[in-house]
Image: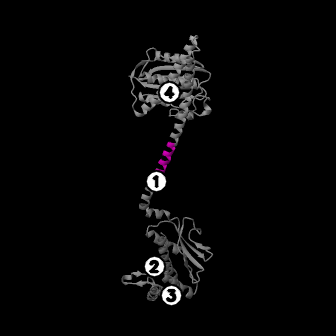
Amino acid sequence: MELRAQEHFEKMFYEETYYNRYISFLTANKGVGEAVKVTGITPYVDRVVKNFRKLYLDKGYHIWRNNVVVYHVDSKFDESYQLHAAYIMQDSINNNARTPITFSLQFADSVFGGELRKVGVSDEIDIHQMKYPSQEVIGSVVNPHVGIMDMTTKLIPLNKDSTECVRGIVHSPQKSIIASIWYMLLPLGITFLFMCGCVYFQIRIWYVQRKLKQFQKDFTYSMIHDMKSPLSSIMMGAHILVSGKLADKPEKMEKYKQVIIDECEHLLALSGRVLMLTQIERGELELHKEVIPLAPLLKDITEKYLLKATKEVHFIIKCEETCSVYADIFCLREILGNLIDNAIKYSKDEVEIILSCEEVAGSTLIKVRDNGIGIPLKEQWKIFNKFERLSANNRKSGISGFGLGLSYVLQVMKAHDGMISVESVEGSYSEFTMCFPLN
């Protein structure tokens, strides 16, 4: 682009010197007839050719037939025939003109722009006339300032001592450059996008690995913490029973036996939940679906929770005797127990849980509503993710768990071709709705 701009700027300088200043010089000094006579003919052609031939040979150039020029690569002589011809005419004008003939910026701008447009460069151009070496701009066609993205040509002197020069400006030629090499930039762009994609996926894989590592730590801690308490209770009860201290106290002995049974069931439920999640993810879970009457099932579950509840719990069951669901009985007990357990955990001292069932549009809806602390709206989208638990600020301290419960419920509902949704107001209530398709 620079070479093209420089080449056409030199051509412009020749044409401005000849067709503008030299013709004006001939008209003013030798008459209009002489000016007409030389119009279209390069002045001093023979002398210029002879001088340049000698000069080129002296500089190491060799002219072969058909005007092919061969020169040494270390030669510093790189100015063209037409530029030297323009210098000769310019010296003739400056030395012999009766009145000074100035360089025409408008003529130069018109020729320079026209030459560049012929080769497909349509960017805005400008011509600066300036002093040297101060480079003070004393004349311009459009704008005396040069931008960071602008391209400039070499200076061409307007007199022998080079105190005045002209230069060409191509404003922001990047558009033309890119348009001319787009086919080269296309594979580069594709490669760049591919590399960006690789970096993105690398960062994403690193993030997932980091998250999985954190999940592993949290799961291990939660599992140990959640299993430590029932194991301690089992060991304590077993030691007391073995010691024989309760041999004469059958009521307390039965109580300790029941505690051991309950804690063992708790441990089995935890391990079964993790095992079932693994089976679901592997696609190995086998469901044994049957039609289950919901009223007696809900009554049985609530009675067991009332027996082992550590806080005041009130259950309200809204279910008709004829309401049923087509599901796996073991999985249904597990997910209902999980939702009830969460409702008790994340509620105040007095808990009210409403269990309702209804058949609507070919589906059975089971709802579990509590009067607990609720779930913030900004965190409702992630509660069904594995290992996810709500912010510590919104939860009571000392509440244990793996963060697997609601993920387990979601996976079981998907295995039943059903779905689960949540509606909650922070500080007021939470209601989970499970939708099972009918048989």
Q: Who comes first in sequence, dot 2 or dot 1? A: 2
CB contact under 8 Å: marks 2 and 4: no
Q: Would you name the residue on which mark 2 appears?
A: 73
In the rendered image, the residue lying farthest to the left is: 66
- 350 relative position to 434: left or right: right
Q: Who comes first in sequence, dot 2 or dot 3? A: 3
CB contact under 8 Å: marks 3 and 1: no
Q: What residue type is labelled 1?
A: Met
What residue is at 53 percent from the left and 16 percent from the top? 257
Question: In the image, which is nearer the foreground, mark 3 or mark 4?
Answer: 4
The correct choice, above or below, for 146 with respect to 285 in the image is below
Q: Who comes first in sequence, dot 3 or dot 4? A: 3
Give how far apart the Cα atoms at labels 2 and 3 are: 46 Å
402 and 352: which is toward the camera: 402
The correct choice, above or below, for 383 with respect to 184 in the image is above
Q: Would you name the residue on which mark 4 appears?
A: 270
Give how far apart the Cα atoms at labels 4 and 1 are: 45 Å
Q: Would you name the residue on which mark 3 appears?
A: 31
- Whole-percent x and y of residue 384? 50, 32
Q: Quadrant of residue 372?
A: top right
Give how far apart the Cα atoms at labels 2 and 1 are: 40 Å
Q: Would you name the residue on which mark 1 appears?
A: 195
Q: Around disc 4, counting alpha carbons within 10 Å, would you say few (fewer than 14), some (14 to 19), or many (20 or more)? A: some
Question: Is the C terminus in the top left, top right, bottom left or bottom right quadrant?
Answer: top left
Assign a secondary structure to mark 4.
Answer: helix
Q: What residue type is labelled 4?
A: Leu
